[in-house]
Image: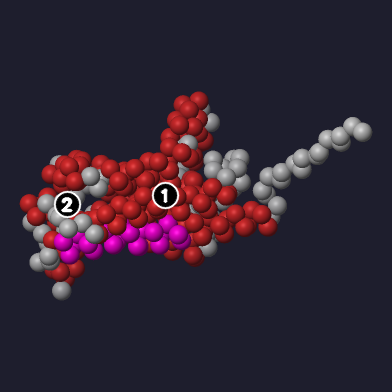
Amino acid sequence: MAGTILKWVVPWEFSWVFLIVFVGTALAYARGCRRLRVPLARRAAFWAGMAMIYLSLHTYFDYFAEHEFFMHRIQQVLLHHLAPLLVIASYPGTILRAGLPLAWRVRLRRAQGGAVWRALSTVLLQPAVVTLGFVALILVWLVPDLQTLAMLDWRIYRAMNWSMVVSGLAYWWLVLDHRPKPPGRMSPGWRVLSPGITMTPQIVAGAIVTFSKTDLYPIFEICGRAFTLNVLTGQLIGGVIMWVPAAMIESAGGLLALRQWLRLSRNGRLPRRTPVRRARVAQ
């Protein structure tokens, strides 16, 4: 029993970089929770998202993601959709900042006020750039040739997984922003509509994979499949995962954005439109 549990806990491919980033983030959040009063629901959302990231990248689950297409799609949905959504929905920014040492907080504030950070954030966190990147990364890594490269080269494979997490966090940070625009980068109305727009090409791609009658990703056959499952059946399951669960998660994100929009409206924090006065026509 203990050996079976240890098998699942031990990473399939160990990464010091991931472990340092993960543990550092977890410690900062835990320290921040001791300094600030954080509701239980927000804590639960954060730790659930973090657990999904760790499970997907640093346990034996990663073995199945590398050897079965539908397991790989589960991994990508967790990394790109659900885990980032839960982490950002917990609004961890203030808590993480509070968990840093004072000297680090001072340096972080200075860096955020600097010209370099403002220039980079203006480009990299521009809503159109983040939204296009969010969708493009899903479609790009579905290209069979790129999928083959990722499975054959561990560096490309890790870059793929990291890109999923980072793009998911950036996208949901824009969509679930609780502030009006400005200072928010996306207007509340677009935050609600955006998940509906981004899920459309994903649904189309999922449908294409689902109804395909040929093996689109033979690399999983070359690597050795984890389950004795028909190739097209596994591919069909993977396409459905891209199609239905991913769309449901994005719909949930849109509902959370709608909740924030209603809260801003209820609190009178939305910009008011100036009524247009009609000029009197001279008699």
| Three-letter code, disc 2 | Leu
Secondary structure mostly seen in magenta is helix
As drawn, is 168 to the left or to the right of 60? Answer: right
Q: Which residue is mark 1?
A: 198
Q: Residue 205: x, y in percent?
A: 30, 52
Q: Residue at x 48, y 40 (%)?
A: 127
Q: Residue 91: x, y in percent?
A: 50, 53
* Secondary structure under the numbered disc 1 in the rendered image: helix
| Three-letter code, disc 1 | Thr
Q: Is residue 275 above or below residue 206?
A: above
Q: Which residue is mark 2?
A: 216
Q: Is residue 52 above or below residue 184?
A: below
First to last magenta residue range: 232-252
**Does residue 213 show up magenta in the picture?**
no
Between 207 and 219, the one nearer to me in the picture? 207
Q: Residue at x 25, y 45 (%)?
A: 141
Q: Residue at x 25, y 41 (%)?
A: 159
* Secondary structure under the numbered disc 2 in the rendered image: loop
- Is residue 269 visible in the rendered image? The answer is yes
